[in-house]
Amino acid sequence: MMNTPKYNWEQLSAEYLEMSHQNNHLTLKLFCEQKGIPYNTASKKMRSVRQGAPLGSQRARKHGGYAQIIINTFGEDAYNAIANATLEDDLLVLRATLSNTLDVLTGAQEFFNSLTSWEEKKKMLEPLLSIHAALDRKIQRIESVSMTVCKLKLEDDQEYKRKMELERLSLMIKKIRNEIEFQIVTKGSGKLTPLEKICADIQSMENDGFVNCQ
């Protein structure tokens, strides 16, 4: 009997997110093919990892020393909030920090413009450029996370459509199988199918069902 391989879904989820940030064309299905892991199972397991563990669950506590540091520093409620955060939550935080950076940049720019001495402006130039660089990094990060969120939603939609199509095909196959079984039973009992009965009635007419145009 073959043993089912065990996967570290948290590690695989983190690896997929990192790789997808570097390659925007990487899909979860392609990632699974590269890693040799089942796509359907990975889609469910990795989605639950991204959504975080339920509050108070033992799985949420099975983490390394960083989790204990967070609990000791900020409290267990803060840790639970972080552990259950989604990519949408990360996106909100990034946008909030972007707004704060814009406020800092506005204040720094106004202060820079108020300076009259070139020496003073020269000293202020480097911090001002650093704020601009931080702003660019935050924007790039927001774009990357936004693309990942959209990609995951698209994969979920595609998986849902695939399941619906499989269900439709299953019902169609079941219908065809029932029709075949019905034909076998009716022919075996000497009974005619509805279509065969209509044909027999037409053939029993004097003119075989044809209209005499003469």
Image (cartoon, rainbow, N blue to C red):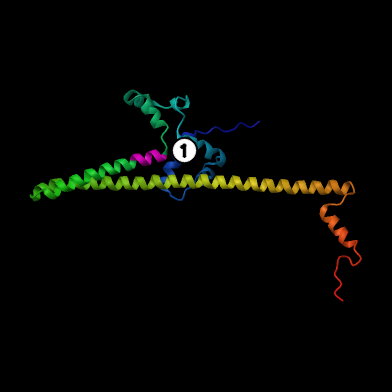
User: Helix, strand or loop at disc 1?
Assistant: helix
Identify the residue shown where x is 90% and y is 49%.
190
- Residue indicated by mark 1: 13
Instruction: Please tell me which residue is depicted at 83% across the width and 47% down the height of the picture.
Output: 184
Task: Tell me if residue 173 comes above or below residue 54 in the rendering.
Answer: below
Q: Is residue 51 magenta?
A: no
Question: What amino acid type should be assigned to the residue bearing mark 1?
Answer: Ser
Q: Is residue 194 left or right of residue 116?
A: right
| The magenta segment | 87-93
Q: Is residue 90 magenta?
A: yes
Of residues 30 and 210, the one nearer the viewer is 210
Q: As drawn, is 91 to the left or to the right of 108?
A: right
Q: Can you give x and y, in whole percent of width and height, for residue 163 in the image?
A: 60, 44
Give the position of the C terminus as an image quadrant.
bottom right
The residue at the far left in this view is 117
Query: Would residue 66 be visible to someone looking at this image?
Result: no
Residue 115 position, x and y percent, is: 10, 48
Tell me where residue 156 appears, x and y as whole percent: 51, 44
Q: Nearer the viewer, residue 194 or 15?
A: 194
- Please state the horizontal and vertical placement of residue 121, each as a whole percent of the image: 12, 48
Along the line of sight, the residue nearer the viewer: 92 or 155: 92
Count all numbered tags in the image, as a single digit: 1
Horizontal side of residue 151 vs 161, given as left or right: left
Q: Residue at x 81, y 47 (%)?
A: 182
> Which quarter of the figure has residue 60?
top left
The one of 196 and 202 positioned closer to us in this rendering: 202
Position of residue 49 relative to residue 183, above or below, is: above
The main secondary structure of the magenta stretch is helix
Seen at 46% across and 38% down, the residue is 13
Q: In what quadrant of the picture does the N terminus appear?
A: top right
The answer to whether residue 88 is left or right of residue 45 is: left
